[in-house]
Amino acid sequence: MDRDPHEEAGAVSPDGPPSLPARSAERAESPSLSMLRSVWDAYVHGEATPEDVLGVLDTVTGFINFELETLRQQALKGISDPESPTFQKIVGAFELHLEAIDRMAEEFPDESDSEDDLGEAFLEGFGLAQKATQQLIEAHAQTMEHIQAMATVGCIFCSHANARESQRCARCGRPLPGGPAGSSFTLVNQEGLEAGPPVGEVTQNYAMVAEAVENWRNGSIQTEELLTTLEDVEQRLACHRDESQQYYDEIKQAPPQAQAALSEAVAMTEEGLIQSLAAIEKMKLAFDKEDDSYLESGLHEFEKASNLMVQAYHASREAACKAR
């Protein structure tokens, strides 16, 4: 026997709209979805008016538009890459959420419009909102995988990718710059390296700071935690800069035909470290002067410095490959 199409959505009263499907334990619900579910349940039970439901729809719309504007500003300032598949997936999810809101709002037409199929528009829109939320969850997971993929240290002599905490290269046995803490010199995202430097590679230090800033913006961490991250990264960068002579000493052990190129890469790294430290100092000014513009501009400058060190990594990799 075919099932009633409304059966999964709860009991259907001839005098009122159907309730939403019960929340699935396997499917996460965002705060927006929870708000929409709560107000619709109240409406079904006569505890909320159409105006109450429309008010929640307006609130959620405002939140989504704010997030979309934030993404747009990040793209304009170079903080995010608008061509990134993950960035586009997030934007697409928010746009789908707006489409879902519009469909839910059709539940309450003008008096001149038909009110047949009670509840159909809201339930259909809520389903779209669930799809949008799932898309955001998947994009977040991809972002975390991307950050974790950055946590490797590349050997400047043989270009082998080692675990971040490694002190010596697993392939050639030479010391890795920076020791167990890793090095901003060679710590970059390894995805796509064989094809040359793709757009968007960053150092692990930048990835940590960018993630901390994003968590601070959305309220996941407090100002003290963000400042702690900035100071930890600043200390690590300073240590890497102090170890520059070690890099030059180790380069003397490399094949003669690779030494000049490796020295240039280390010099480029030193400049990147200097720029990175200046950028961190600027970001900290945001809290001394209570002006978020220092945080934004400092992060942008830190990304540029990170890109410089990524270029140094590729230069050292190319030199090491030619020497083999």
Image (cartoon, grey):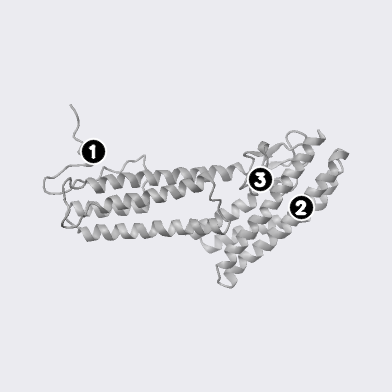
| Badge 3: residue crowd in 10 Å (few <14, some 14–19, many ≥20) | many
Residue at left offset 21%, top offset 42%: 10
- What separation in Å lies between label 3 and label 1 (alpha carbons)? 48 Å
Image quarter of the N terminus: top left
- What separation in Å lies between label 3 and label 2 (alpha carbons)? 15 Å
Residue 121: tell me if it is visible: yes
Name which residue type carries label 1: Glu
| Badge 1: residue crowd in 10 Å (few <14, some 14–19, many ≥20) | few
Q: Identify the mark nearer the N-term, 2 or 1.
A: 1
Q: Secondary structure at mark 1?
A: helix
Residue at left offset 28%, top offset 61%: 55
Judge whether 160 appears above or below 113 on screen.
above
Q: Secondary structure at mark 3?
A: loop
Q: Nearer the viewer, mark 2 or mark 1?
A: 2
Q: Secondary structure at mark 2?
A: helix
Residue at the extreme front of the image, as rendered: 112
Q: Which mark is residue 188?
A: 3
Residue at left offset 67%, top offset 59%: 234
Q: Nearer the viewer, residue 139 or 280?
A: 139
Q: Is residue 68 left or right of residue 41?
A: right
Judge whether 11 appears above or below 301 on screen.
above
Q: Is residue 2 left or right of residue 64?
A: left
Residue 183: tell me if it is visible: no
Q: Identify the mark nearer the N-term, 3 or 1.
A: 1
Residue that badge 1 annotates? 8
Name which residue type carries label 3: Val
Residue at left offset 51%, top offset 56%: 215
Residue at the extreme bottom of the image, as rendered: 289
Q: Is residue 124 left or right of residue 254?
A: left
Q: Nearer the viewer, mark 3 or mark 2?
A: 2
Q: Which mark is residue 268?
A: 2
Across and down, in percent, residue 49 comes to 19, 59
